[in-house]
Amino acid sequence: MLTQDWKDRAKVRIAQLENMHTDEVIQKFKDSGALLEGHFLLSSGLHSSAYLQCAIALQSTAAAIEFGAALADRFRSQAIETVASPAIGGLVIGYEVARQLGARFIWTEREHGEMVLRRGFTVGKHERVLVVEDVITTGGSTRDTIAALQAAGAQVVGAASIIDRSGGRADVGVPRGSLATLNVPAVKAEECDACKRGEPLTKPGSRSTNDSV
Ligand SMILES: [Zn+2]
């Protein structure tokens, strides 16, 4: 019989980290309720055995400082002038990474579906920018942010996130780093093993924890 610890380890691919161990990051997420295990209906309509809500973990300013330090350490030698994050998810961790790097912080946001710099934010030609997100799932928000910055003339030198939910597969076109990689697939209901076992489906954020469909 497998222990729960073994099963947890099997789900989480161990990333190579010098500063903060991936297990520590995952444990902090679990302890804060930001990472739940079970049988979840995601907003995409897909089912997954893990539900992640980074904002829950980042309620703790102490945790944000720790994650920020671990990410900042990886890019400290890269002469980052500005950190840019896609709003809203990237704002808290992006600001903290920028603060620890002594860099400027700006953000991109969607306007009519397109990721843009607003609010008078500008970047200089060849300005060295790091893009920071809370979680990378497909890499779409980070890719769109990089495109907006490059179109404005910046040199995007890297991208970082606390969690990589793509299992390491998301390609954003620049070197990318994460503190922990989750390799938990999201699947269609008809392909879901938990559904086949008859396990009740939970819709995170809803009042009932047995909100089956
Ligand atoms: Zn299911």
Image (cartoon, rainbow, N blue to C red):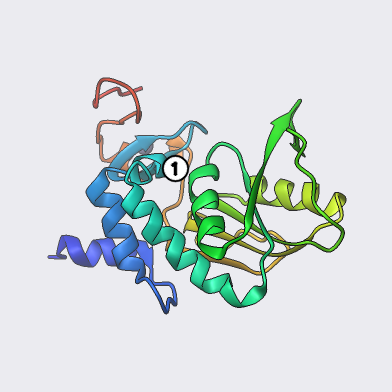
Task: Indicate whether 6 appears above or below 28.
Answer: below
Q: Position of residue 183 (x, y in %)?
A: 43, 59
Q: Would the CB of label 1 be found within 8 Å of ligand 1?
A: no
Residue 199 occupies quadrant: top left
Q: Can residue 134 be seen in this view?
A: no
Q: Can residue 124 be seen in this view?
A: yes
Q: In which quarter of the image is the C terminus?
A: top left
Q: In which quarter of the image is the N terminus?
A: bottom left
User: How many numbered marks, from 0 up?
Assistant: 1
Q: Where is residue 133 in the image (x, y as percent from the top left)?
A: 56, 51
Front position in the image: 86 or 49: 86
Q: Position of residue 170 (x, y in %)?
A: 61, 58
Front position in the image: 171 or 146: 146
x 41%, y 40%: residue: 55
Report the amino acid beneath label 1.
Glu
Ligand 1's image quarter is top left
x 26%, y 50%: residue: 30
| 113 displayed left or right of 100 | right
Q: Where is residue 39 in the image (x, y as percent from the top left)?
A: 31, 39
Residue 108 occupies quadrant: top right
x 74%, y 28%: residue: 111
| 151 displayed left or right of 8 | right
Mark 1 crowd level (few <14, some 14–19, many ≥20, 10 Å Cα)? few
Residue holding disc 1 = 191
Circle 1 — which element?
helix
| 69 displayed left or right of 57 | right
